[in-house]
Image (cartoon, coloured by chain):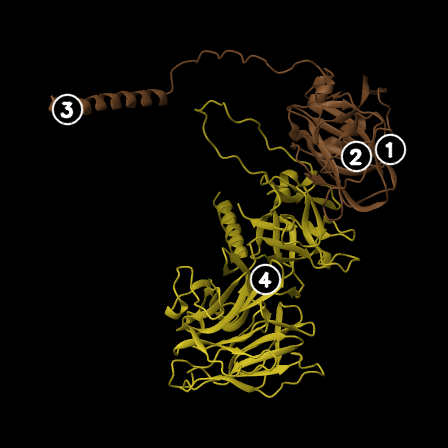
Chain colours: A brown, B yellow
Amino acid sequence: MNRKRTLFLPAMALIILLGLQSGVNTALAQPPGQRPSLPPIPITSDTTHTLTRHFVPASAAKKTPDAKGFIQRWLVLEPVKKDIARNSILTDSYLRTTLSADNFSSDYTIIPKNGQTVKVGDQELKWYALDSKTFNVNLYHFTYAIDKPRYGILVWLVTVIDSPEEMKNVRLAAGANSASMWWLNGQEALTIPGDRDMVADNVTSQRLTLKKGKNVIRGAVINGPGMANFCLRFLNEKGAPIKNLTISYR
Amino acid sequence: MKQRIQIISTIVLLLMLLSATAIAQVGKPFIHDPSTLMESDGKYFTFGTGGGGLISTDGWTWYGGGVRPGGGAAPDVVKIGDRYLIAYGATGGGLGGGHNGRILTMWNKTLDPNSPDFKYSEAVVVASSDGVEDNDAIDPGLLLDPTDGRLWLSYGTYFGFIRLVELDPKTGKPIEGNKAINIAIDCEATDLIYRDGWYYLLGTHGTCCDGANSTYNIVVGRSRKVTGPYLDNMGRDMLKGGGKMVLDATDRLIGPGHFGRTVLENGVEKMSCHYEADLDQSGRSVLGIRPLLWKDGWPVAGDLFKEGTYEIESVRRGYALELAVDFVRMPGGMRFNRNSDEPIKPVASQQLADVINTWPAGNIPARIGDYMGRPHQKWTITDAPNDTTGYLGGPYYKIVIAGTERALAATADGEVVTVPKFTGASEQLWRIDQLIDGTYRIMPKLVPNSGKKLALVSIGDSSPTLAEFDFNSDNSKWNFKTH
């Protein structure tokens, strides 16, 4: 009996091992023909077009940069629809031509009013004064929230920075998906061409001066496919974020 | 087709020659057994065997003119307070036949023979060997211990042991009652240095004084105590012949020996030595200056910068320095999901001729972007023509977009641009130093209208500028990559 059991157990082990082995081989082989389509993933996210999910309508309350110096309060214009198949077309030249043509004003110090509509080409577009709930401003969330085109868009932006004193040798540091251009007090400060990702401090301006009092920042973010967003802050001479600013939309 | 192959072969050969160029010091840098480099009166000095020494105003071009009385061999120098202590071996280390040796020290307030303060004190004997004992008192190396201010002298050659004795940093004489101890065997030209809690003993092994056939090479061991034991990376005591390689011969520079360390600033260090034979300079013994790197706590000789065409990579994110020009797409888009039976053929890289006409004619800003192997990202770096100046260990370089004369230049407002044509102006000349971690610092010779010493820095991932060098920041570091 004992001897039989001794033989029986290794035999069973061999059979199980061979079975497992064949299972492994089957699992590795590519099944022939088309696979059946997978069932759709049920939507559990909130699909409503709600601006307050990611933004707070800007108020007169004092707003300062966040703990890392990022500017979260912006006037955001509804998107200008653009036909952009690939972001690699967003070269310096393309940006200059397009932003010059599809512009609501060539006065880069102008401060639009919250709720005001402006004309860009044949499109009537409305300004929204918003505080982003995150360090960056997600323009995909914005355009989804207001139920406007989410891809192939140009979004104009304005904010007003109040500086307690003149600050020399500061740099405007931005990251945007995809391309963008930025102006400070009417002067071009930064161009970010190409198929970019939203990376903090991806590009910085040359040394600039923030004047005491109000400084107007104008921006334009342009994106084809994918998510559009940006982040922006100022860095001091040592590369540290500048936080003693107040931000308004007026 | 054949002609084309010949042209390509010629270009490849030229590129190989270009990329192989790496020269030692220029001028008349002829010396044997150089002392550690010293700065005095705005110049660099090193002294060698037989008396005399070399002087350089910039660290790149060296000429004779140094004055060291006493003859003998292989001096070393250390600065203590506002004075220089010079040690030298009065004898020849067995070359003359005997091993009866003496080490002497003397002081001077300056190393510049043109200075009114130039006057050596009387030399005093600080160590000796009787010709029978297992030591030959030549090849002194001096260390002023930065942790406690004590002064140490190592000395000796292949005849027995390397010895260590303490000297009085006020007098340069031996401390009364102090006895020399053995710290290594069967090497010569030792030098002691200290870094981050370790004492390092550098020694030279191999054959000296046989030109291109010299097998001289520099090795190192380290110890937590200045008195040893000095162990190599395998735990082998230098008293048993241990030593980890710091520098041996390269293709054209043969037989390095007589290590000396120079710390320029945090992260920027150089080592000096002599090569027994520089095959590009008649096979003569010349002064060598290389970057000194530190890897896992061990000193390693860095690379002499080689001329060539490179991607200049910012260590900050890994992006590459480039012209701020429109990106030009290559033909074709998505290449996957194709008929797999299609014949496979190579796709030509984008060429300069494909894009150069899209570039503006005037100044073009520099930018940093993800490397794509495109013409606006390839930089040819060569020794600047018609410029004989340099810095410790290297000449100034011309940096242009490959195949063009469009040159990288510093601007008066502390930024970087490219100018359409290289003129040789100082703001277009660049200093390249390999740092102790193997990355590089790139600095303009001159920032116009500025007395500041600035380096090429990544202030954003995509934004180059000029700013003060900070070794602790990857913003200040660059790599030169070939593909």
SS for tag 4?
A: strand
Q: Horizontally, is B430 left or right of B439 in the view?
A: right
Q: Is residue B167 above or below residue B20?
A: below
| Mark 4 or mark 2, whichever is nearer to me | 2
Q: Nearest the camera: B456 or B448?
A: B456
Q: Chain of mark 4?
A: B
Q: Nearest the camera: B104 or B483?
A: B104
* Residue, disc 2: A64
SS for tag 1?
A: loop
Q: Amino acid at mark 2?
A: Thr
Q: Horizontally, is B42 left or right of B253 in the view?
A: right
Point out residue B87 in the picture as x, y percentages from the top left corner. Answer: 55, 80
Q: Amino acid at mark 1?
A: Thr
| Mark 3 or mark 4, whichever is nearer to me | 3
Mark 1 Cα within 10 Å, few/some/many (few <14, many 20+)? Answer: some
* Residue, disc 1: A109
Res. A83 visible in picture = no
Residue at 67%, 80% (x, y): give it: B109
> Looking at the image, is mark 1 or mark 2 earlier in the sequence?
2
| Mark 3 or mark 1, whichever is nearer to me | 3
Residue at 72%, 83% (x, y): give it: B116
| Mark 1 or mark 2, whichever is nearer to me | 2
Q: Are marks 4 and 2 on the same chain?
A: no
What is the CA distance from the residue labelled 3 to the residue labelled 1? 92 Å
What is the CA distance from the residue labelled 4 to the residue labelled 2? 44 Å
* Residue, disc 3: A7
What is the CA distance from the residue labelled 1 to the residue labelled 2? 21 Å
* Residue, disc 4: B269
